[in-house]
Structures are given as C-alpha cells and as structure tokens.
Image (cartoon, helix red, strand yellow):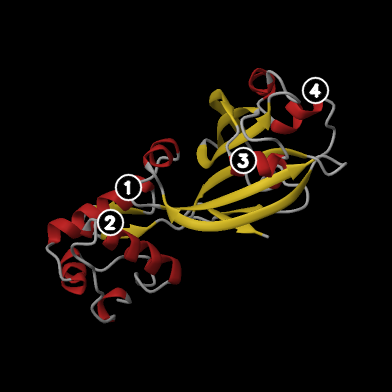
C-alpha cells in the first residue's frame, strides 16, 4: 500500500493547530499527490496512520471523519476508507471571467445565490481598488455559487453605491452580476487584476461551502472594470481546493 511505506510524517504540537487538523491536511495533500492510497484508492489502516503521524487512533479517526464530512473520503464497511474519485471543476480566470459560462461545459445547473448585503463606508484599500475616496458609500454583497447543487464558490463583492444604487436588489432579481450590471448600463466588463493565494477556510466558509474545519480554500482578489477602464467591482472569492482548480 502506497501510504504504509512512507516515512513517518511530523505533526507539530503546541502550535495552535489541532493534531487531527494537521493530519487531515497531510492526508488531503497526499491524496492529491497520489502518495496516500493504493491503486484502489484505499487509505492505510488507522493503526498505520497513527504510527505514521505518531498519534493515537482516536486522533486519526477525527481527521478521517472531517475529510469524510468534506466529501474527500468515504468508508466502506469491512473494506476500509477510500478516496472519492471525482474530477475537479476547472474555473478559468480570463479577461472576461463569468461564473455561469466558466462552468457551462462542466455542470448542468449553475446558480449564484445572494446570502446577504449591507451598505458600508469604503476603507482605504477598498476605496483605492474602486477608485473612490475613503468613506465613500459602497454596497457589499455576499454570494454563494453552486454547480449541480454543490457549493463551489463563496464571494464577497463591493460596488460603489453612488454608481450602482440598489444593486443588491437588482442582483437578487437576476441572480447574476452580469445581468445586474447590465441594468445599470454596463453591458460589458473586464478583469483588470487577479491575485491568488491558499489558506484555511474560516468559520463562515466552512459552513457555507460545506467543508470540514481546516479545509483549504483558494482565495482570489479581483478588480473588474468597465470598457472605459473605470473600476466597478472588487471581490474576494473563496473556492474549495478539493473541488475547484483555477486556470489562469
């Protein structure tokens, strides 16, 4: 078995990250690399994993339970724990990045749901990204994107309230950023910049994306502009790393 012959992996105690969470991350990484399971996709027994990580079986069991909740692995009575073999969605980051069209060949049903919205004052960094002055009014929109009923993105977007008044209500009516912007006369928009990083999911992302604590999300920071080059949207979007691969 691939996982049982690998050298003992180190986990760190006293660093503020639970041992089971560190082990879950190690198993997740090993599955992605193909080093944590045999040719059938079966993980090593709990006893082997416990020896490998230098912990008791209860800690390993907690890690596997978290991965099972996340949908990364599943257990078959009498046979063991297996990796779920499912292909990641590929989400393209392009000059024109759209949620629905980006996944149209990979999922039959693609939806964006408005979770909440609020009026805020733009802080310095946000104001700079949107070409506003600090303190100018903005609208924050929280959305959840699903593909065939599975959560694949959790986004926070800001728009100038002066240019896009009531955009939250318009979005709720259309369930589409593109359609909402069109009602304000923006018939096209372009991606001006995107930065990408990986981090652990926070409590909100864990809940809304149906992840286990400690799961990894890919975070993008993006600015969209209208055809004249004026910033219209700043967004922070989180994608579950086990479900989505970004193609830049």
CB atoms at circles 3 and 4 under 8 Å apart?
no
Numbered badge on residue 183:
4
Vertical comparison of 13 with 139: above or below? below
The residue beneath circle 2 is: 21
Disc 3 is placed on an element classified as: helix
Question: Which percent across, then down, holds residue 49?
Answer: 21, 68
The picture quadrant where one finds residue 19 is: bottom left
The residue beneath circle 1 is: 213
The picture quadrant where one finds residue 156 is: top right
Q: Residue at x 88, y 41 (%)?
A: 228
Vertical comparison of 182 with 36: above or below? above
> Quarter holding the C terminus?
bottom right
Q: Residues within 10 Å of mark 1 (few under 14, many from 20)?
A: many
The residue beneath circle 3 is: 126
Which numbered disc, 4 or 2, marks the residue that appears first in the sequence?
Answer: 2
Q: Residue at x 53, y 51 (%)?
A: 219
The Cα–Cα distance between marks 1 and 2, rounded to whole angstroms, is 7 Å
Which numbered disc, 3 or 1, marks the residue that appears first in the sequence?
Answer: 3
Towards the viewer: 106 or 99: 99
Which numbered disc, 3 or 4, marks the residue that appears first in the sequence?
Answer: 3
CB atoms at circles 1 and 2 under 8 Å apart?
yes
The Cα–Cα distance between marks 3 and 1, rounded to whole angstroms, is 29 Å
Q: Residue at x 65, y 39 (%)?
A: 127
The Cα–Cα distance between marks 2 and 3, rounded to whole angstroms, is 33 Å
The Cα–Cα distance between marks 3 and 4, rounded to whole angstroms, is 24 Å
Disc 4 is placed on an element classified as: helix
Question: Which percent across, then down, holds residue 79?
Answer: 25, 60
Towards the viewer: 35 or 218: 218
The Cα–Cα distance between marks 4 and 2, rounded to whole angstroms, is 45 Å
Q: Residues within 10 Å of mark 3 (few under 14, many from 20)?
A: many
Towards the viewer: 136 or 156: 136
Question: Which percent across, then down, holds residue 22?
Answer: 28, 61
């Amino acid at each position: 078995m691939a996982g049982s012959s690998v050298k003992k992996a180190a986990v760190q105690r006293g660093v503020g990250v639970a041992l089971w969470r560190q082990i879950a991350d190690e198993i997740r990484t090993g599955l992605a690399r193909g080093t944590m399971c045999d040719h059938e996709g079966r993980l090593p027994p709990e006893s082997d994993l416990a020896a490998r990580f230098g912990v008791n079986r209860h800690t390993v069991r907690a890690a596997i339970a978290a991965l099972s909740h996340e949908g990364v692995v599943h257990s078959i009575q009498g046979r063991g724990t297996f990796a779920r073999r499912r292909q990641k969605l590929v989400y393209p980051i392009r000059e024109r990045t759209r949620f629905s069209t980006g996944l149209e060949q990979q999922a039959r049903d693609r939806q964006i749901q408005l979770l909440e919205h609020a009026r805020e004052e733009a802080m310095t960094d946000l104001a700079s990204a949107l070409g506003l002055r600090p303190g100018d009014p903005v609208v924050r929109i929280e959305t959840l994107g699903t593909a065939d009923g599975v959560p694949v993105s959790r986004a926070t977007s800001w728009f100038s309230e002066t240019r896009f008044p009531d955009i939250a209500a318009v979005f709720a009516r259309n369930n589409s950023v593109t359609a909402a912007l069109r009602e304000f006369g923006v018939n096209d928009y372009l991606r001006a910049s995107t930065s990408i990083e990986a981090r652990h999911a926070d409590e909100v992302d864990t809940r809304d994306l149906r992840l286990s604590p400690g799961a990894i999300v890919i975070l993008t920071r993006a600015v969209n502009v209208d055809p004249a080059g004026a910033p219209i949207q700043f967004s922070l979007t989180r994608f579950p790393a086990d479900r989505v691969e970004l193609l830049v």
